[in-house]
Image: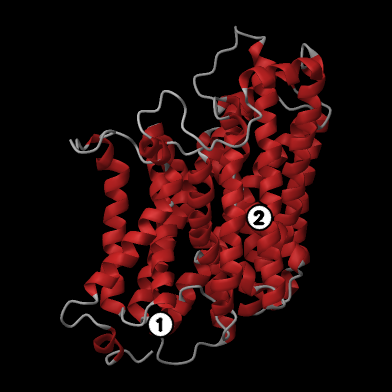
Amino acid sequence: MTLGLIDTLVLLLSIALVVWIGLRVRSTAGTVEGFLLGDRNLPWWAILGSIVATETSTATVLSLPATAYGPVGMKFLQIAFGYILGRSVVVYFLLPAYFDGKIFSAYQVLERRFGGSTKQFASILFLVTRNLGDGLRLFLASVVLWKLLGWSLAWSAIAIGAITIFYTYFGGMRSIVWNDCIQFLIYMLGGIVTILIIGNALPNGWQGFWEFAAETGKLEVFQFAPPADSATTWGWLLNDAYSFWAGLIGGAVLTLGTHGTDQMMVQRYLSARSQTDAARALWFSGVVVCIQFALFLFIGVLLASFYADRPEVVFEKSDEVYAHFIVHSFPKNTGMIGLMLAAILAAAMSTLSSSLNASASALLNDFYLPMQKDVVPPERVLQLTRYLAVGFGVLQVLIGIWAGSLKDTVVSNSLTIAGFSAGILLGLFTLGNLTNRVGQTAALAGSLLGLACLLFVQFAWPSVALTWWPDANLKIAWPWFALIGSMTTFTCALAVSYLPGCERKAVVATNRN
């Protein structure tokens, strides 16, 4: 696809705005606290926008319409209700721990309870899974530019990464948050524009669309009972990701992990002016995410109606449907295509920039500074933080380019593994809050067993024949992974603590923290 002059100007203007914001706020990133946490003085509504934009990647913008285009329809929205419930628990039970003292890293809380080794294990788990996952998300965003603009995959990844590294390096957290807000507005505006364009292009108008939606049931949100062809209720609950219970329970537990223990999100809470502001931003972000999901899912239902009258158009993957409509049905050289490309880039950069800053913070505060015998000058710490952010940016670009040589199944499995950390970290934080017996040795053992359990569930369980189980070959749906990981980590750590020498007293006695 060749961009017209107006579309090119819209795209370049959005990129220029991102760079300008990074340079505009560079003076506020002159200290470590300013660079990593925006001097803990950011307004709650800006943090809200940043939370939403950070958890929205290019894969979300393209995959949500693809999900609704298929048989799922609007049922994915049930997971968003679970997200709201999970955020409520984080606000009341986990958030206070982050404002109990001046900390920079989520995993410093684990150090207080278990010890330095647990903190470092959690931080390593975050660094590995976060950079692997975001490198693969960068790959998915690069594929979009590759297919829409004809750029090579490598240069697409380098372009997105370079812009993100630039404004993160100069502006730090304040630049990231304000850019996230702008990027949120861009991709939401792109979604609204898409609805208007599809609505005008529907062959039978809106009346035909509502009839199509009623016939196919794509606007149905709730699914409380299994379909008639389901072998068992338990089998349906475990392998259907879009049942009400998987959405509510699985989505809530997943959010407890991603928004309650992930450094990338915790860093935003610590940037707020107070715990009250952080709580307000976190809870309302769940409502905004629900609205955002509804918008992009509705686009998918509209696309299903649009292409229902075009049987000659066949997609190998439903993920291609939104990009296909942009290329072939958006009005050319009106700024609309440029806006959509800007929206796709915005979704990618908002996630990546947050990842770079959070990774630098975790490595600096959980590993480098505790290893130093002497106090490191603030200027040196700030310089190292910037360099680390750049280093993680380069790493993610390299992962994105490397992913181009992998099969789609490898990429999807890798993204699944990248999500394992949410359940394991949630198990650790739950152990710290609900038990007094479990010490560092038991906590680490439980974490490793939790990781082993998730790997088994993902790769071995579908092929394991269990004669006593009626659905022996079922594949457990992804919303349950966080619950499985957290429960396994918790119960195994508690069990190990009863072994000789593994109780908490033995750990505390040798722990200076």
Query: Residue 59: horizontal and vertical position, in percent?
Result: 56, 40
Q: Quadrant of the C terminus?
A: bottom left
Real-space Cα distance between discs 1 and 2? Answer: 29 Å
- The residue that mark 2 highlights is 286
Q: Residue furthest top?
A: 312
Query: Residue 281: horizontal and vertical position, in percent?
Result: 70, 64
Q: Is residue 82 left or right of residue 21?
A: left
Quadrant of residue 436 within the rendered picture: bottom left
- Of the pair 409 and 338, the residue shown nearer to us: 409
- The residue that mark 1 highlights is 113
Query: Residue 85: horizontal and vertical position, in percent?
Result: 59, 57
Q: Is residue 70 left or right of residue 175?
A: left
Q: Is residue 456 left or right of residue 215?
A: left
Q: Quadrant of the N terminus?
A: top right
SS type, badge 1: helix
> Label 2: few (<14), some or many (≥20) within 10 Å?
many
Quadrant of residue 170 within the rendered picture: bottom right
> Residue 461, relative to residue 84: is it above or below?
above
Q: Amino acid at mark 2?
A: Gly
> What residue lies at 27% left-to-right and 90% top-to-bottom?
510
Q: Amino acid at mark 1?
A: Arg
